[in-house]
Image: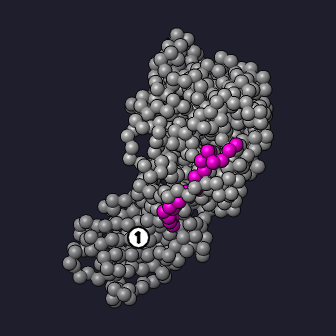
Amino acid sequence: MTQLFPKPLVIACLTVVGFSITQGCKPRGAESAVSGDAASKVYVAPGKYDEFYNFVSGGFSGQMSVYGIPSGRLFRVIPVFSVDPEKGYGYSEESKPMLNTSHGFIPWDDLHHIALSTTNSEHDGRWVFGNGNNTPRIARVDLKTFRTAEIIEIPNSAGNHSSPFLTENTEYVVAGTRFSVPIGDKLDVPINTYKENFKGTVSFIGVDKTTGRMSIAFQILTPGINFDLARAGKGKSSGWFFFSCYNSEKANTLLEVNASQKDKDFIMAVNWKKAEEYAKAGKGVKKPVRYAHNVYDESTHSATSTMETEVLVLDPKDCPDMVYFMPCPKSPHGCDTDPTGEYIVGSGKLAATIPVFSFTKIQNAIAAKDYDGTFDGIPVLKYESVLHGEVQKPGLGPLHTEFDGKGNAYTSFFVSSEVVKWSVKDLKVLDRVPTYYSVGHLSIPGGPTKNPHGKYLIAYNKITKDRYLPTGPELAQSAQLYDITGEKMKLLLDFPTIGEPHYAEAIPASLIIKNSQKIYKIEENKNPNAALGDNHARVERKGNEVHVYMTSIRSHFTPDNIEGAKVGDNIYFHVTNLEQDWDVPHGFAVKGANNAELLIMPGETQTLKWVPEKAGVYPMYCTDFCSALHQEMQGYIRVSAVGSNVPISFSTGKTAPIAAATESAPVKTE
Ligand code: RUQ
Ligand code: CUA
């Protein structure tokens, strides 16, 4: 959360409604309650399913969370860019490579936007993508398992905010830089050479139709401005992409003031079909870079991280008719295309109107070379020529717009804390409702697709002040659910959220339920350290490594008594969950391990590494309440002093462990 608006707006805000300077205006009638039958509209009876899944970005928590709509019930937190001790994500040996980058292991990021995969501009329920802002990355979560399946780092980028956005058939996931940075061989330059040396990029990452696997197809080099958000064209504007950008002043300090000088910044329009042709025709230059590409393999239950070394860069100078700028007042944040693809809405957060651009007019202006000069050699289209019109006096601090599929747009206003409904065709304001408070993104089920489902609108608020029981200095961020089936929007429900939500999408539950995976089949387990039955369970020493190949099934571990480990050994517990029943994970934890637990799904193998520092006997146990005898699901590992000659031995169900004969031929127990 930063202060988004300069003094003049704040003063306007103060005089209009009177509220705090840094937190936006508190709308009048903040105490106004929900009306009539709101409770029955959000009530999902015990044992019944919600109609929609809501995938919500976690902001600085680095994860995604999944709620039911209309109930607002939280179902799952999916770790993406942040380690999650609850699930062992980023702690197990198998999942650690997911968080590898060209800067090494990075256990955190800032996830702002999510994008549900589409086919023909409609949700297909296969994947959800998310961006890492801080160390530029894009993740793909598989909606069969609700787990992060892949993370790709974006080179030549910083502050990967304008990301991820998808083309109509998920051909590409697209990412724009928020921070421009020095690119190429000259990286160590004075900061005040920003104007000469700093550049932006937008990256087009190809997505394999069948597997979803990502690979960077090309990047487009751009002037050193800040890309904020983006949307693909669809329908009429198929083949194009639109990016909002601010800091056309190219300031490198005190952007609050220096990047708010000009009346208009830009929306950048990219003909990506043309860019694709240029890339294929060899118009790009391959630049040496380093970026990590991490893939989780569902059969080995393990991630691998590969360092890539090259990226194809297209320079608009060598690629005519590929990139255009459209002036957009003032410091635009959201950039949203309507369901038909004809209209592009720019939300200038410091502007007094909302400009709506027409794709038809953009094409005519390009054909007629109706330019207003150039910006860094890239043609700037004339504002009046590409404008469909402006929504007059909509509110203060417009940020994001969603659509209901009935010709209406809904824009969030951070400063005036409200959602405003307006008609896309004639640009008339139709309705407004307060939010509590300082709303950022909005989500309508199917909102960014060509056929939104309408019905509900969810507002994600940054500040909640007096809405919930106080919890010390930090309060929950929140979502608010509105009914949008009628002419007037109606508030139905508040629900607190995990992390700070930015963008979110909602999708009919039916599109996801049918694919949801229940178990990993044990016969398909290709983890090289799996023990595919109690009779394969064993302990082996290899130098200073001790490998425990362990199985878990209700309600015991095999082996559960282990001796012969020594202080300073690298002990690897490879735990295979032999269950083949839905919703029966086992957990695994050892006293003193400076690690998290493992949470192992049915049929899966996961590994916990531990380097004991003191001799003694250490209990280990299952952390997930799996049966009536869960509390009995425990064992011991004995750790002896460095020079000790206690042999490796292990067992389950014997009063004393059975010694291994030699290091190379360990004894098996039944
Ligand atoms: S942003 S609250 Cu990071 Cu999408 Cu507008
Ligand atoms: Cu297994 Cu509790």
Q: Is residue 567 above or below residue 663?
A: above
Q: Work out whether residue 534 or residue 335 is closer to the camera in this orientation and state it.
A: 335
Is 654 left, or right, of 601 in this rendering?
A: left
Residue 180 in view here: yes
Q: Residue at x 45, y 79 (%)?
A: 537
Span highlighted in magenta in the image: 302-321
Residue 406 on the magenta segment? no
Q: How many marks?
A: 1
Q: Is residue 608 above or below residue 468?
A: below
Location of residue 546 (image quadrant): bottom left
Mark 1 nearby-residue class (10 Å; few <14, some 14–19, many ≥20): many
Q: Work out whether residue 229 or residue 422 is closer to the camera in this orientation and state it.
A: 229
**What is the three-letter code of the residue carrying label 1?**
Phe
Residue 310 on the magenta segment? yes
Magenta span main SS: strand
Q: Residue at x 47, y 58 (%)?
A: 290
Location of residue 559 (image quadrant): bottom left
Q: Residue at x 35, y 71 (%)?
A: 571
Q: Residue at x 78, y 26 (%)?
A: 425
State how the image is colored. Answer: one colour
Q: Position of residue 288 (x, y in %)?
A: 50, 58
Q: Is residue 212 above or below residue 187?
A: below
Question: What residue does disc 1 label?
Answer: 573
Q: Is residue 106 above or below residue 533?
A: above
Secondary-structure class at tag 1: strand
Location of residue 30 (image quadrant): top right
Residue 48 in view here: no
Q: Position of residue 266 (x, y in %)?
A: 61, 32
